[in-house]
Image: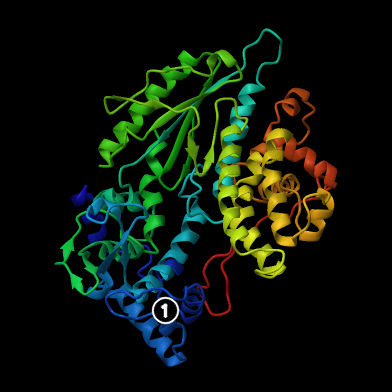
Amino acid sequence: MRRQWKNHLEKECITCHGTREQCRVFIERELEDAIKKLKLLKSPGEDGIANEMIIKLPKKGRQMVLSMINRTSVERNLPHDWKTGIIIPILKEGKPAEESASYRPICLTSNVCKLAERLVLNRMDWIIQKNKLIREDQAGFQKHRCTEDQLIRIQQKVLDGFNSARSRNARSKRTLMVLFDFLKAFDKVWKDGLLWKLIRKGLPTCMIKWIREYLSGRESYVRSNSTQSRKKGFKHRVPQGGVLSPKLFILFIDDIVKDLGPEVEVSLLADDLAVWVQHEDPKACERLMQLAIGKIEQWAKRCRMELNAAKTEYILFSNWNRESKWEGQLVLNGQQIKRNDTPKFLGVKFDWNMTFTSHVKQVKDKMRQRLRALRAVSHKRWGSRTEDLRTLFIGFVRSVAEYAGAVWLTVASDTKIQQVEVEQNIGARLITGCLASTPIDALLVEADLVPLQLRGRTAAANAREKYCRDNHNPNRKITESQADTKNQREMKGKSWGAVADKITKDLETRDIEPEPVIRYGPRLHRGQISKE
């Protein structure tokens, strides 16, 4: 593998000689756009340069920084400080301090290097979007994509299976889903394999050469108080905390499901992988899934990644009560995969019949726990102002219920949603100081809050509008398939697409022609923006 990519990179980029837009040196406008995205109060790396120093640089200073970054791009040689990381161990809450596994490592790297990475990333993102180099199933670190997209897609597919029976005697489709877990995913990235995959995807040779230099010769040391360890190099992995690292990782993992058959569907968000198959017979689902697991095992072995069989789990979605405790015989790396009745994927708990009972309980308990903090700073006669209490409630308490609200707040039963509404009503009383006898409608008006179910319907309408506008989002198929549905079975089964379509009908926005999403590329020339 190493010989292949080395032979390729040793050849001159004869197709452009640096004249293509993606291969030209960076300009001031690109640097200005990158500096605007720098975050304040971030610790510096080995060179001691903070983001505040970069932001306050005068024009001449910024030109010098740009000249240095362009020099690294032309010479393919990065300063040693850019490749050195400082690892700060942070003790996890409730863990014993004498055990090394109790610490979370935080790696500090050069902020100037991160600025250079952002310049490279802006051009790389444009090439990836323009040439569709990343599969649509991947939503991690992608513009206009989020966790909610993947959760909606899974929920829609499962309920489509429930609603697939068109007659009384027909059997609906079951959905068998496996949630895979990678062991130290970002730390196991095979550098030679990554560079070869970048070549195969057609990224510019000059960009790949810069990335090769960026990945090579990296080392880190641990600093605790005034003590530091010896420096240690890393053979594999993408740099922790690097701006480029997430994008490089999803490019590396992009072909993990390439060899899976058309009957297998996947959902990817960085290293969070869900794979599912559908069939009327659970045993047929099991056979299809075991074949898919075998192919993913082969990919992991070929790409030197490690799957964690102990944390990988499966669930069978079914609308038959007799199959609620169905046990399969799925094997990964010689170990039997465990069944989980309520697996958590991207922060949402699923259950076997897709009623979100477990997730509602989780949200309710978490809101109740956080309401204690609100209660500690509120009182009828003393405490924080009403405006401050409301801000705290919205950002700290209500945000728990609103996460993925378009997924579960629109399809869960009214009884379950009411359990969460009760917690919001408690928060509204803490905000306003109203009596327990105050009517709920008047209480919410006084606290300037909206019922959570209405917030969920709003989020679903916004999500559907986004899918209608974005031709590159795979969830657009959901809106197209539900555009003219009159299937009462789907409404009874609360298919997300049918519910969202009904919401837009009620809002009288369904027939409005949506404006398409416009994707802009980097500013490669002064005053000019690349546009798809």
Q: Is residue 92 left or right of residue 409?
A: left
Relative image position of residue 216 (x, y in whole percent): 22, 62
Relative image position of residue 36 (x, y in whole percent): 51, 76
Q: Is residue 431 left or right of residue 148?
A: right
Q: Which residue reaches farthest top?
A: 169
- The part of the image, by quadrant, that contains residue 490 is top right
Name the residue at 68% across, 39% down: 419
Residue to which mark 1 is pinned: 51
Residue nearest the observer in this picture, 121 or 414: 414
Residue 142 visible in rendering: yes
Relative image position of residue 185 (x, y in whole percent): 33, 47
Residue 481 visible in rendering: no
Q: How is the image coloured?
A: rainbow
Position of residue 465 relative to residue 295, above or below, is below
Name the residue at 79% across, 44% down: 504
Name the residue at 36% across, 76% down: 112
- The part of the image, by quadrant, that contains residue 118 is bottom left
Residue nearest the observer in this picture, 325 or 48: 325
- The kind of residue on which mark 1 rests is Asn
